[in-house]
Every structure is written in C-alpha cells, then in structure tokens.
C-alpha cells in the first residue's frame, strides 16, 4: 500500500502536469518564464514551512555549493520551458528531454573518465537515432507557436525554421547542463550525504532573485493570463490561463513530491520504471487528446528512444533476474 500510493500519485501528478502545460502553451506559448517562476515560488514556500521550519533548520550543504547547483538548475528550467516559444511542439519536447541519458553518458566520459559496457553504447545509439528521426521529421512540418494578429503578416517558413532551430538549441543546452548538474549532485552527495528534500527546497528558493532579470517578460504574460478568456469553474468565472497555470503549479508539486516519496519507499528499479512509463503515457495522451501531428516515423523514433532507455537502465534485465530468482527460490522450497 505504501508503494501503490506514491506510484499512483506520480502518474496522476506528472501526467496531469503535462496536460496543464500543453493547455497553457496553446493559450500562451510565451508563458514559459511565468510557469517556471510560479513553480519555483510554490515549492520554495512549501520548503520554507516544512523543510527549513521557517528558517530555523540550517542546510547541511554549503551555500557556495548550492549556488553552483542552483545556477545550473535555473538555466535548465528556463531553457526547457522557454523553448515552447520557439515552434517546439509538445511531443518533440518530451522525446527530446528523454534523451538526457545521451548527455549524461557524454559528460560522464569527459569529466569522470567513466567506462561503460557495450549495452550502454548500443542503447545510447538507439536513443540518438530515435531523437534524430523525430527531429528531422518535425523540421519538415514546422508551425509557428505564435498567435498571429489578423492585421499582422504571418512569419515566413524561413523565420519559422530559424526560431525552431533556436528552440532545439535551447533544449540541447538544457540537456547537457542538466547532465553536468547530475554529476555535480553526485559529488555533493558523496561529500555531505543525501538530503534530497533539502536540495529540492534550496534549488527552488535560491534562484528566485534570478527571475528579476525576467521580470518584464513575467509581468507581461501575467497580465495576458489575467485578461485571458474566462471559463466557468464551480459556478464562478475565472481567467482560463490562470486556471491552467494554477493546475500546472499544483500538479508539478504533486509530481516532484511523489517522486521524492517513491525514492524513499521503492528501489531505483521501480522508480526508473515508473518514470519511464509515465513519460510514455504522457506522450501518447498528448498525441491522441491534443491531436498533435505524429507520423509513422515519429513512432519509430519514439520506440527507439524508449526501448533504448529501457536497455540503458537495465530494467528488463533486472526484472528478469528478480523473477528468475523468485522462481528458483520457489522451486527450492518445493
């Protein structure tokens, strides 16, 4: 029961978060900074109350170390959410972010001088080819994510391609910074021990001043959200974009906190399997419900990415070994 609840909340929170995110992006593609700031603010408030006990609990990891980690985390979050403003469709966004294993391996080889077994290289090649296929096919049907005013001239195909390439560049930068951040976290955990709840709090609290650099953009999109088309909810009228934003922030908190609980209650195998399945379900829902363009080539690329992920994380092997060990034990008992 302790395992079933966090697993259920991961699927509910994370999948719902993707739905609200896509609804937000369709209403206002440029709201990435507003979304990021709102998520950081809520998680910081929750951490201030429950993790730092209103500032009375001192952090176990040094401030300077956190600032390095925070700078990377802030850049990753802003790049990922801001990419929606540059003609990046949701399915490609999800597939691209699933390629984090590629960046992790490359950074591990360069920085930590790690050596990997052949199966890891094969799985990364599968993921790489999958992402390349999806990216090439998506480049042939680029659509502007900007809302075109009736009196304005729509952007040309060359302009759309330029901003699409810029969006892909943002996602690529975010992948490699995220991988470097993961390696830096490993170093911090080795020196100070694992304190994931504390790390979650400070990685969301300390970047808040950075949002002053984005204040004009956040303000403009907050005004757009407040003045968006009204929708009826519980008998009252609310701005549609604000409702979607609130839903996204709350489900983001549910998603992150549920994954944290899952890591304390389950094995890493279970966590990896749940997160991988959650990503795949979110992708399928996005394609079907939001009727996003998805050809047979997209499906081939998607299968390569997720099968490659399963091979890299050794989920299939571990499940087989666990099942095999249980079968052997049962035969011994008999």
Image: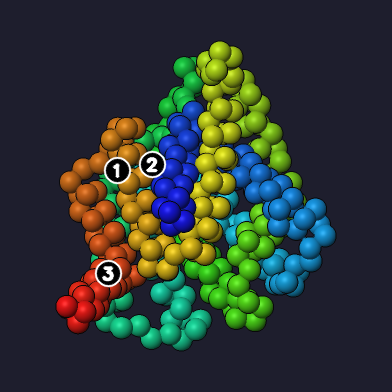
Look at mark 3 in the image and give the residue it sits on. Answer: 319
Where 28 falls versus 272 (above or below)? above
Residue 104 in picture, x, y percent from top left: 44, 71
Disc 1, SS = helix
Its colouring scheme is rainbow
Q: Quadrant of the N terminus?
A: bottom left
Look at mark 2 in the image and give the residue it sits on. Answer: 89
Among the 4 quarters of the image, the one containing residue 35: top right
Q: Residue furthest front?
A: 334
Q: Residue furthest right?
A: 56
Report the mark closest to the observer, 3 or 2.
3
Where 226 falls versus 271 (above or below)? above
Q: Report the disc number at residue 157.
A: none
- Alpha carbon separation for disc pair 1 and 2: 14 Å
Q: Residues within 10 Å of mark 2 (few under 14, many from 20)?
A: many
Identify which residue, 77 or 63, lies in the foreground: 63
- Alpha carbon separation for disc pair 1 and 3: 24 Å
Residue 328 visible here: no
Q: Report the disc number at residue 284.
A: 1
Among the 4 quarters of the image, the one containing residue 140: top left
């Amino acid at each position: 029961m302790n395992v079933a609840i966090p697993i259920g909340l991961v699927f509910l929170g994370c999948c719902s978060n993707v739905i609200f995110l896509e609804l937000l992006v369709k209403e206002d593609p440029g709201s990435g900074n507003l979304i990021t700031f709102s998520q950081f603010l809520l998680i910081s408030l929750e951490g201030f109350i429950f993790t730092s006990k209103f500032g009375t609990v001192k952090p176990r990891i040094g401030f300077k170390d956190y600032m390095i980690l925070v700078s990377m985390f802030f850049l990753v979050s802003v790049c990922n959410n801001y990419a929606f403003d540059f003609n990046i469709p949701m399915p490609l966004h999800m597939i691209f972010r699933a390629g984090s294993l590629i960046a992790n391996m490359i950074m591990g080889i360069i920085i930590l001088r790690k050596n990997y077994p052949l199966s890891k290289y094969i799985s990364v090649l599968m993921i790489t080819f999958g992402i390349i296929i999806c990216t090439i096919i998506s480049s042939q049907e680029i659509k502007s994510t900007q809302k075109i005013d009736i009196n304005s001239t729509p952007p040309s195909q060359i302009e759309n391609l330029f901003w699409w390439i810029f969006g892909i560049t943002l996602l690529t930068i975010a992948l490699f910074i995220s991988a470097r951040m993961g390696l830096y976290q490993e170093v911090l955990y080795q020196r100070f021990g694992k304190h994931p709840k504390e790390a979650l709090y400070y990685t969301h609290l300390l970047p808040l001043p950075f949002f002053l650099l984005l204040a004009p953009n956040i303000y403009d999109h907050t005004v757009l959200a407040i003045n968006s088309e009204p929708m009826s909810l519980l008998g009252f009228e609310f701005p549609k974009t604000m409702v979607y934003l609130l839903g996204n922030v709350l489900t983001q908190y549910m998603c992150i906190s549920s994954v944290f609980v899952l890591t304390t209650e389950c094995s890493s195998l279970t966590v990896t399997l749940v997160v991988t399945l959650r990503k795949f379900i979110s992708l399928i829902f996005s394609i079907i419900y939001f009727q996003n363009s998805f050809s047979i080539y997209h499906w081939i690329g998607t299968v390569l990415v997720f099968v490659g992920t399963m091979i890299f994380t050794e989920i299939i092997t571990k499940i087989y070994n666990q099942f095999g060990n249980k079968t052997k034990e049962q035969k011994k008992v008999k």
